[in-house]
Amino acid sequence: MTTLVIGCGNPLRGDDAVGVNVVQRLQAHALPDGVHCVDAGTSGLEVVLLIQDADRVIFIDAAASDGTTPPQPGRIHERSPDDLTAGDSWPPGGVSMHAVRWDQALALAKAMGYASPAHIQCFLIEGGSFDHGSPLSREVETAAEQLVQRLLQELSSEVS
């Protein structure tokens, strides 16, 4: 089985870098055979091509508060791709080829009839500061390490 862990985000925008940060942390560990980590940065369209041969894909990205609850930097949300692309108003504001997010790319791939991995997980870590040039906040740094430990345990248990 091939598992692809894709970290998304802009490393120059504070907590937005968390997906990339998690992937870099995972790469520092001995991962099971068949597990590959990719820093996708902000290249949403490349996701369509990256996932073609994977059996399982794990996306990691930052998220802003959903507005229904008070912001809670460091809160980890696990979502399915359907959760992210559901609703009549998807994608909000339409799609621009200059700024396609990975969740929009998944929907685009599905609409175009591309094969989809059998299992897709999405982990969104709620950020607090997305200021240009700022580091990860303490809360997001802690959440990133918690997610790394969780993924290492899940990925190693699948091989055992």
Image (spheres, grey):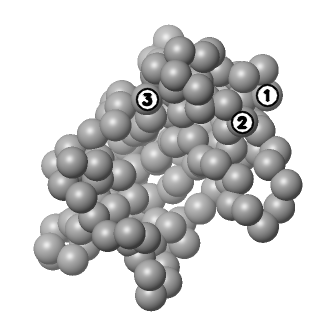
Mark 1 lies on a secondary structure that is helix
Circle 2: is it few (<14), some (14-19), or many (20+) Cα within 10 Å? many
Q: CA distance from mark 2 to mark 1?
A: 8 Å
Mark 2 lies on a secondary structure that is loop
Q: Residue at x 46, y 22 (%)?
A: 11
| Quarter holding residue 151 | top right
Whether residue 52 is visible here, answered yes or no, is no
Q: CA distance from mark 2 to mark 3?
A: 14 Å
Q: Residue at x 50, y 67 (%)?
A: 84
Mark carried by residue 139: 1
Q: Amino acid at mark 2?
A: Gly
Check disc 3 and report the residue beneath it: 10
User: Residue 138: percent from the left, percent from the top?
Assistant: 78, 20
Q: Amino acid at mark 1?
A: Glu
Mark 3 lies on a secondary structure that is loop
Circle 3: is it few (<14), some (14-19), or many (20+) Cα within 10 Å? many
User: Residue 94: percent from the left, percent from the top?
Assistant: 32, 70
Check disc 2 and report the residue beneath it: 128
User: Residue 155: percent from the left, percent from the top?
Assistant: 54, 38
Observer-nearest of 98 and 118? 98
Determine whether label 2 and label 3 are within 8 Å by CB: no
